[in-house]
Image (tube, helix red, strand yellow):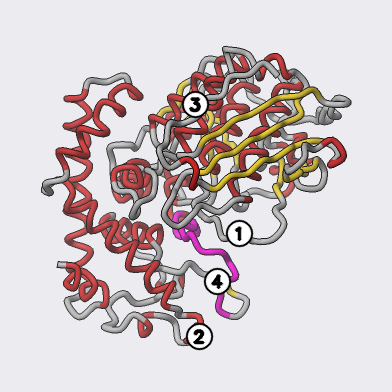
């Protein structure tokens, strides 16, 4: 190991949650006191998905980058954060093909800096050589483009579907889709078999459930998979589909004492650009074409410009797991988490409609929270925790609507304007004007949405009790 330890300076370091993890081929070689993460047990690669990444540019470093992303996810999910201390300390050892590269000055500092910035934790990583090389994926006949212009990380989300449609209109087949989750909507099995980058090619298995749900490592996972795809097809651009509320809102207004959420933020992708250039020698940039638009503006543009645009109705926004939002065998969306609430706000602001049966909470106009749910949703499942979850989502969107006119806005701008200006290579004045415009639009949309559901709504009751 050629080592630097880039540790955050924290006066409360001793009270932080800690974890030592070894990612390797056999638990026999694990350090004393380490939690083993074993290849083919805790980290498994899906053969067909991995083969969908096997372009002519495939090499062992690409494989190792996927392993490192899986290792970070394993750590993140294996140690819960303490109630009053966000940060954790991770001591991670990973087997890779070329430990000298991963430990070099061109890679290691940028890797640890990126992880620290994204998760708010301290990361120490050691790289050791593999006992034997990993098997390279079989190269199958896939439709890898020869002149790729950009890749877009793609899922069943509304922003994802809408921005992919809008960008496809501009770039045609030069836009490459990288599936990060969900179903291959509208494609036959034969079509899916020819498509590269069909899904994230690995799965991470954690023993037990430690109730750690902040999931900050998902940003690293998805950004790394998209960057690998861009490298494999020689594309210089990665499209991030999130609109302004989703990309910037979680960082501008973190929940409680939580560390700002940078998973879809330009400051995080700026870190990733430096890491990928050092690791793979590939210069790329992450672009945010809808950053200064609201989700409603993105949806409205998609509905107006793209053929078969009604497919947005089948997209999923909900943060809840399927088992939590099913009635009988029918999966719905909850309708009351922050993501669902932003979706419903956006559909209203875009002058569109969708079936109320898309949601468990079919009515937001009910005077009582429980009465808004479908009658088939058991009362025992409407827990105090679920209610608090819904309240938090509503208050976040309301707080975002009030932010521009609040006393704290000056502090927020002071904290984030220069950061965004650096990440986007624009002046702070430009960023301020664009942020003001996006927040003003959100305020208008939120006000109209809240009015539309009626004064008797449980949502308006929550908002009134806040003031």
The residue located at (72%, 51%) in the rendering is: 205
Would you say residue 317 sits in the magenta stretch?
A: yes
Quote the CA–CA distance across marks 4 and 2. Answer: 12 Å
Residue 210 horizontal/vertical position (percent): 61, 59
Q: Is residue 445 above or below residue 155?
A: below
Camera-side residue of 195 and 261: 261
Mark closer to the chain start, 2 or 1 = 1
Camera-side residue of 54 and 16: 16
Q: Is residue 356 above or below residue 376?
A: above
Q: Is residue 243 above or below residue 270?
A: below
The nearer-to-camera label among 4 and 2 is 2
Residue 411 horizontal/vertical position (percent): 18, 38
The nearer-to-camera label among 4 and 3 is 3
Which residue is tagged 4?
Answer: 324
Q: Is residue 5 left or right of residue 160?
A: right
Circle 2 crowding by C-alpha within 10 Å: few under 14, some 14–19, many from 20: few
Mark closer to the chain start, 4 or 3 = 3
**Which region of the structure is painted magenta?**
312-327
**Disc sitting over residue 210 in the figure:** 1
Q: Is residue 419 left or right of residue 460?
A: right
Camera-side residue of 286 and 169: 286
Which residue is tagged 3?
Answer: 113
Quote the CA–CA distance across marks 1 and 3. Answer: 26 Å
């Amino acid at each position: 190991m050629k080592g630097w330890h880039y540790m955050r300076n924290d006066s409360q370091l001793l009270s932080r949650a800690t974890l030592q993890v070894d990612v390797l081929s056999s638990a026999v070689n694990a350090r004393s006191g380490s939690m083993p993460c074993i290849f083919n047990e805790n980290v498994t690669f899906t053969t067909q998905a991995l083969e969908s990444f096997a372009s002519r540019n495939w090499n062992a470093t690409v494989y190792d980058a996927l392993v490192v992303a899986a290792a970070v996810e394993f750590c993140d999910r294996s140690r819960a954060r303490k109630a009053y201390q966000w940060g954790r300390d991770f001591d991670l050892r990973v087997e890779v093909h070329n430990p000298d590269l991963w430990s070099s000055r061109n890679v290691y500092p940028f890797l640890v800096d990126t992880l620290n910035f994204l998760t708010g934790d301290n990361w120490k990583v050691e790289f050791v050589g593999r006992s034997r090389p990993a098997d390279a994926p079989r190269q199958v006949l896939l439709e890898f483009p020869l002149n790729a212009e950009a890749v877009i990380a793609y899922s069943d989300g509304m922003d994802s579907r809408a921005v992919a449609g809008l960008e496809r209109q501009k770039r045609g087949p030069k836009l490459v889709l990288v599936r990060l989750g969900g179903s291959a909507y509208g494609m036959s099995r034969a079509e899916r078999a020819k498509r590269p980058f069909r899904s994230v090619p690995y799965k991470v298995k954690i023993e037990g459930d430690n109730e750690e749900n902040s999931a900050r490592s998902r940003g690293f996972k998805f950004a790394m998979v998209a960057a690998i795809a861009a490298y494999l097809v020689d594309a210089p651009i990665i499209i991030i589909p999130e609109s302004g509320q989703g990309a910037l809102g979680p960082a501008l207004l973190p929940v409680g004492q939580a560390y700002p959420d940078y998973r879809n933020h330009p400051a995080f992708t700026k870190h990733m650009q430096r890491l990928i250039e050092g690791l793979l020698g590939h210069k790329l940039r992450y672009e945010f074409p809808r950053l200064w638009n609201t989700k409603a503006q993105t949806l409205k543009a998609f509905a107006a410009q793209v053929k078969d645009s009604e497919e947005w109705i089948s997209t999923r926004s909900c943060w809840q797991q399927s088992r939590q939002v099913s009635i009988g065998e029918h999966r719905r969306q909850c309708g009351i988490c922050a993501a669902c609430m932003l979706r419903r706000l956006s559909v209203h602001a875009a002058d569109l409609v969708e079936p109320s049966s898309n949601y468990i909470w079919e009515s937001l106009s009910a005077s009582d929270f429980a009465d808004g749910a479908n009658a088939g949703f058991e009362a025992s499942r409407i827990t105090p925790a679920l209610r608090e979850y819904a309240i938090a989502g509503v208050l976040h969107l309301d707080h975002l609507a009030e932010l521009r006119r609040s006393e704290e806005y000056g502090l927020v701008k002071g904290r984030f304007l220069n950061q965004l200006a650096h990440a986007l290579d624009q002046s702070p004045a430009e960023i301020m004007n664009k942020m003001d415009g996006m927040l003003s639009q959100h305020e208008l949309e939120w006000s109209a949405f809240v009015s539309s559901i009626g004064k008797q709504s449980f949502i308006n009751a929550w908002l009134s009790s806040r003031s």
